[in-house]
């Protein structure tokens, strides 16, 4: 790391007597949030003994756990321990912070209360039910392409009920040009599997059954089934799950309308062997390469052109347990057209024998998933270490092995020297990685800022904020730019690396971060296009706790967003200038990142949001620079320039989700 400031600047910071300590609780919490987590096999271990919630248990409690009545007492004890620990944590906070956190937690609990979830689930099941009229219409649809879809199912000791449910869900498809390829690796104790399948095959010749010579594991068995499939497209299907009757029909529409090479759908998990017992509704984003590195969000249902296998290889048993993640990474990278169907067309059964029931108990699968991501990145010429997140072993944080390249930090400031000292001090004390220089962008209306030893550029009279920053960036020598504001404070010592490692990738033109308020609540974490009062944007995770997992854990892996704030964003100077920078008419700091993000997406490139970069915003950007007039003009300009893109909706926010941006199912449509 280079020495960020001259001796003169360091002396000036000390004289202001506003130095920040290198270590605070929030700094430590942010570092812990992004720590490397070791995954262990806890089989046979008392989970309470390794949980911080129940640490320091008395001998009396340990003895009680061995008694016959412990199952009755345990829920009461857990409630007591939970309340006790959380009370202690709240007591250590200042009263205002504790109140804000408690209010937020209660609000989230209320929005996700059990009665409302049940109501949503019932509404959802009604919304996806196939009517007789719809069935007849789909069955009568004529496609110009005659595509056979091979549904691939390796069988292994499948319970009879699950087996029949699976087969009948294929038989009920409204698209009829399919074959169901079943390869049976069951042992002799489960010979009923063959009997049941042959019963169905006798009634429908589209069912193709082969008894496998031996059980070669999930990858080997799947490859064996693929060997006798004859369809132009392949659909992967697990032996204990079910398809929606319209699944293959909508897949065929994507092939017909878009020439799709790879198609995936939304899905749900259900419990207790009944679809009405919904465990999870997974409404997925459009194709998101960054998300896919962080977790196999595509999962089910996947359908792809058979020729992709011929050029990219079959399943590899070295990745058993996460073989689908490995396959999806390879095929989507090679596919010309990847399409997402925003409909729940796959029903994933959760039961004690399924991987979905407890992936944490299968360390081999976790390790295979990390290797799948690592090896795919290596194939693309990028070396990365893959770490499991602290909330889920199969949510990954990527740490690319790169050497620092020069970055220019542009700090906007408006008549608030005291805040500026705090930011500069936090940069000096906490930044652990990077080669950077600092330019102070003085947007003030009072006496011009002159900080000893610090490069400072002053806004010209009648010059907009966007034009001012464009001018500075054009004159900057460094290849990378990161925009900060005097009201910010640096908590993440590795923020430069965490941003630069993404923006150095050819297809990523901007890498953004999360910004919290002084209570640790999220202010900025990307935006959803097309929502909000004016149909412009809505902030993601706004006012949620920074450590909250987000929808399907998305706040624990880097993901694609349509738009993000320019503050805490890193970009490449060359590409920034190619896209003509910020719209020069913009005079509102909030609008800068939105405008540039949409320019990036217009050129079919990516905006990355790295949630592990967490810094704080103490007050309004540029000390309240953006008045109502500037904000109104900025919104009008964004609508004028980007109305078509905004109207198309956000590809990373599923259309089934609520219009309030809460990532919940939209009940009333």
Image (spheres, helix red, strand yellow):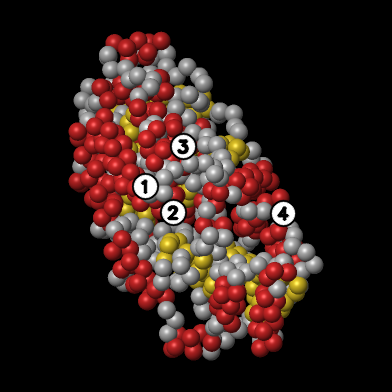
Up/down of 596 relative to 37, above or below: below
Earlier sequence position, callout 4 versus callout 1: 1
Given residues 494 and 630, the one toward you in this image is: 494
Q: Is residue 492 visible?
A: yes
Residue found 24% across the figure and 26% down from its top: 416
- In the rendering, which numbered label is found on residue 317? 4
Q: Secondary structure at mark 4?
A: helix
Residue at mark 3: 50
Around disc 2, counting alpha carbons within 10 Å, would you say few (fewer than 14), some (14 to 19), or many (20 or more)? some
Using the rendered view, name the quadrant where residue 459 is placed.
top left
Residue at mark 1: 74
From mark 3 to mark 1, how far is it between C-alphas?
16 Å
Residue 480: x %, y % from top left = 50, 33
Residue found 44% across the figure and 31% down from its top: 31
From mark 2 to mark 3, how far is it between C-alphas?
25 Å
Residue 355: x %, y % from top left = 56, 57
Q: Is residue 366 left or right of residue 629?
A: right
CB of mark 3 within 8 Å of CB of mark 4?
A: no
């Amino acid at each position: 790391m280079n020495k960020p400031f001259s001796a003169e600047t360091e002396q000036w910071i000390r004289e202001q007597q506003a130095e920040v300590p290198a270590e605070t609780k929030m700094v430590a919490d942010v570092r812990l949030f992004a720590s490397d987590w070791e995954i262990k096999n806890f089989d046979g271990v008392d989970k309470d003994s390794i949980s911080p919630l129940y640490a320091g248990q008395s001998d009396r409690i340990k003895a009680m756990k061995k008694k016959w009545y412990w199952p009755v007492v345990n829920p009461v004890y857990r409630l007591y321990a939970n309340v006790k620990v959380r009370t202690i944590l709240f007591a250590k906070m200042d009263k205002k912070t504790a109140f804000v956190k408690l209010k937020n937690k209660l609000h989230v609990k209320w929005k996700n209360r059990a009665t409302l979830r049940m109501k949503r689930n019932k509404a959802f099941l009604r919304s996806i039910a196939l009517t007789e009229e719809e069935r007849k219409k789909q069955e009568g649809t004529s496609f110009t392409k005659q595509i056979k879809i091979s549904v691939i199912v390796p069988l292994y000791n499948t319970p009879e009920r699950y087996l029949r449910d699976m087969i009948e869900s294929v038989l009920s498809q409204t698209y009829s040009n399919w074959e169901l390829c079943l390869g049976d690796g069951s042992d002799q104790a489960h010979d009923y599997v063959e009997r049941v399948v042959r019963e169905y095959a006798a009634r429908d010749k589209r069912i193709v059954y082969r008894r496998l010579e031996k059980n070669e594991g999930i990858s080997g068995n799947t490859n064996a089934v693929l060997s006798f499939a004859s369809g132009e497209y392949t659909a992967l299907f697990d032996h204990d799950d079910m398809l929606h009757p319209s699944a293959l029909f909508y897949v065929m529409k994507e092939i017909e309308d878009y020439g799709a090479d790879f198609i995936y759908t939304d899905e749900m998990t259900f419990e207790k062997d009944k679809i009405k017992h919904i465990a999870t509704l997974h409404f997925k984003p459009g194709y998101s390469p960054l998300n896919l590195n962080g977790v196999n969000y595509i999962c089910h249902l996947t359908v792809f052109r058979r020729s992709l296998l011929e050029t990219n290889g079959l399943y590899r048993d070295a990745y058993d347990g996460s073989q689908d993640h490995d396959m999806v990474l390879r095929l989507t990278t090679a596919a010309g057209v990847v399409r997402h169907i925003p409909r729940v067309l796959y029903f994933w059964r959760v039961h004690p024998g399924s991987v979905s029931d407890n992936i944490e108990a299968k360390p081999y699968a976790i390790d295979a998933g990390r290797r799948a991501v690592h090896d795919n990145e290596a194939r693309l010429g990028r070396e990365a270490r893959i770490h499991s997140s602290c909330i889920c072993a199969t949510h990954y944080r990527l740490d690319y092995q790169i050497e620092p390249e020069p970055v220019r930090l542009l700090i906007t400031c408006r008549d608030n020297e005291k805040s500026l000292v705090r930011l500069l001090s936090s940069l000096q004390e906490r930044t652990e990685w990077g080669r950077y220089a600092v330019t102070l962008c003085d947007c003030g209306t009072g006496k011009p800022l002159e900080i000893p030893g610090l490069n400072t550029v002053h806004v010209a009279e009648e010059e907009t904020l966007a034009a001012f920053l464009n001018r500075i960036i054009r004159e900057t020598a460094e290849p990378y730019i990161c925009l900060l504001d005097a009201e910010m404070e640096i908590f993440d010592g590795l923020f430069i690396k965490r941003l630069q490692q993404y923006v150095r990738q050819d297809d990523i033109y901007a890498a953004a971060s999360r910004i919290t308020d002084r209570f640790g609540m999220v202010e900025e974490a990307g935006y959803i296009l097309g929502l909000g009062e004016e149909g412009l944007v809505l902030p993601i995770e706004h006012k949620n706790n920074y450590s909250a997992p987000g929808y399907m854990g998305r706040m624990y892996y880097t993901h694609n967003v349509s738009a993000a704030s320019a503050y805490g964003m890193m970009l490449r100077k060359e590409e920034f200038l190619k896209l003509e920078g910020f719209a020069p008419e913009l005079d509102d700091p909030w609008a800068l990142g939105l405008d540039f993000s949409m320019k990036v997406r217009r050129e079919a490139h990516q905006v990355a949001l790295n949630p592990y970069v967490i810094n704080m915003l103490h007050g309004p950007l540029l000390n309240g620079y953006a008045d109502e007039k500037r904000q109104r003009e900025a919104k009008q300009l964004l609508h004028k320039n980007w109305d078509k893109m905004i109207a198309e909706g956000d590809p990373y926010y599923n259309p089934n989700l609520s219009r309030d941006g809460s990532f919940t199912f939209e009940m009333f449509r």
